[in-house]
Image: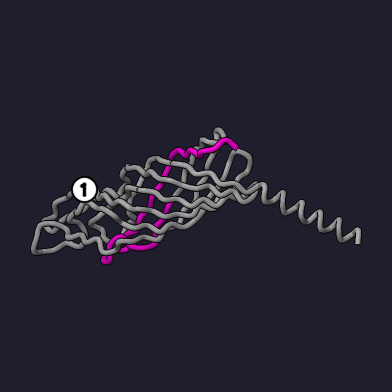
Amino acid sequence: MKKLIVLAFLCFFGVTKTTAQVSFKPGIKAGANFARFTQTDNPNERFYTKTDFYVGLFGALKLSKVYTMQPEILYTRQGSGVEYIDFNNVKHDNKINLSYLSFAIANKFTFDKFNIHVGPTFDIRINDNDKKLGEFNEDFDYYDYDYENDIDLAFFIGAGYSFTNNFEVEARVKKGIVPVNGDWDAENLVFQVGLAYKFGTK
């Protein structure tokens, strides 16, 4: 009987200790996007990096000393620079601006002040600059670019460093798996670097 009481006490103490480690902190984050599309097989076009930004909210749910699950909602401006040669053999240089509302789950593994984080995102396109780019239409003197895919599924991997319990710098690489345009196999590729601030003192 004494052994059962001791065992129950140890189990209760272990659960209480584990529960005490759980905490939730909301936060805000913002930073720079270095975005481009992946190359296609078309020799007449070349995508290159354009600079833009992201901003959003997150909630850091710390479930253990090492692991934190962090849902995020971000407004992220992406797209790509593109050089292409039209039907008249004229070279053009344009910027494609795409804006997404991004829903992400970051799985963060913390080691002292450093962390690594991986996870998926579900992105909904909410705006574009209506550039006439893509498969060349011989009836007109431009590429007819049609944004057929309004969503993007992506995965990211990154790392962060906490200067304090509240401030953190982070960098991540995000790769989409859904072609931006139905006629192309070009996908979103974004390198992000920015700052995050968590509210709370503990």
Q: Is residue 42 magenta?
A: no
Q: Which residue is mark 1?
A: 94
Quarter of the image that includes the C terminus: top right
Name the residue furthest left: 139
Q: Is residue 26 above or below residue 132?
A: above
Name the residue furthest top: 163
Q: Is residue 22 left or right of residue 124?
A: right
Name the residue nearer the viewer: 74 or 20: 20
Residue interval drawn in magenta: 174-202
Q: Residue at x 28, y 62 (%)?
A: 181
Measured from the top left, where is residue 152 in percent x and y?
36, 60
Task: Check disc 1 and give the amino acid type.
Answer: Asn
Measured from the top left, where is residue 41 in percent x and y?
30, 62
Name the residue nearer the viewer: 143 or 74: 74
Quarter of the image that includes the N terminus: bottom right
Q: Residue at x 26, y 53 (%)?
A: 127
Measured from the top left, where is residue 160 in percent x and y?
52, 42
Q: Is residue 112 left or right of residue 154?
A: right
Q: Is residue 17 left or right of residue 46?
A: right
> Which image quadrant is residue 183 in?
bottom left
Name the residue nearer the viewer: 105 or 132: 105
Name the residue furthest right: 2
SS category of the residue bearing label 1: strand
